[in-house]
Amino acid sequence: MARVTNTDTLPFVESRYELGMLASQRVRDLNGGAEPVVEKGHDKLTVVALREIGSGKLDIDNVRHEFIQSYKDTPVIADAENSLEIASEDPLLREIDAELENALVEDSHDGVADAGDDTPDESEDEE
C-alpha cells in the first residue's frame, strides 16, 4: 500500500472524524514505543498509523478504548501538598520553595503592619 486514502480506512472506522482520533492515538502509542504492525520504512508515524488502520491488522477496538481512556484518566491534584515541585528531592528546588514561602510570609506580615500604621492612634487624639 504505497498511498493511504480515506477510502482504504473507511471499512475499519465509522467516519473520517473517528479516523483522525484513532490515528492520533496510534501515533501517541508509536511515539511511546509501541511496535508498528506494518513495515515502517522511512515514513512518518502519522503515515504508519494510517497504513496500520488501512491494513486491517490493527486492533481498532483496542485503539478506540485507549483513546477514550486517555481522556478519562486525567490526574487531579487535590491540594498543593501533592505538587511535584513541593515533593521534589532536588535541594535547589527545595531552597527556592523555602525562599518563596518566606517571602510570602514576610509580605503578609508587612501588609498587616502597614494597615495598622495608617490608622491614627485614638489615645494621642484625646490629649
Image (spheres, grey):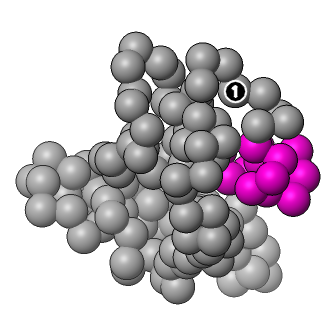
The residue sitting at 60% across, 25% down in the picture is 1
Which residue is labeled 1 in the image? Answer: 4
Q: Where does residue 6 sit, x and y in percent of width and height?
A: 83, 34
Where on the picture, by quarter, is residue 55? Answer: top right
The residue sitting at 50% across, 46% down in the picture is 28
Task: Indicate whether residue 17 is drawn in magenta.
Answer: yes
Q: Nearer the viewer, residue 69 or 105?
A: 69
Q: Nearer the viewer, residue 91 or 18?
A: 18
The residue sitting at 45% across, 60% down in the picture is 104
Q: Taken as a whole, is the magenta stretch helix, strand or loop?
A: helix
Q: Is residue 20 shown above or below 1?
A: below
Q: Secondary structure at mark 1?
A: loop
Q: Nearer the viewer, residue 88 or 61?
A: 61
Q: Is residue 61 left or right of residue 94?
A: right
Q: Is residue 37 left or right of residue 122?
A: left
Q: Is residue 93 left or right of residue 9?
A: left
Q: Is residue 117 shown above or below 55?
A: below
Which range of residues does the magenta coloring cover? 9-23
Q: Is residue 71 visible?
A: no
Q: Is residue 99 shown above or below 42?
A: below
Q: Is residue 51 shown above or below 110?
A: above
Q: Is residue 105 visible?
A: yes
The residue sitting at 60% across, 17% down in the picture is 2
Q: Residues within 10 Å of mark 1 (few under 14, many from 20)?
A: some
Task: Indicate whether residue 73 is drawn in magenta.
Answer: no
Q: Where does residue 81 sit, x and y in percent of width and height?
A: 38, 79
Q: Where does residue 33 sit, x and y in percent of width and height?
A: 31, 47
Q: Is residue 54 left or right of residue 82?
A: right
Q: Where does residue 26 sit, x and y in percent of width and height?
A: 55, 49
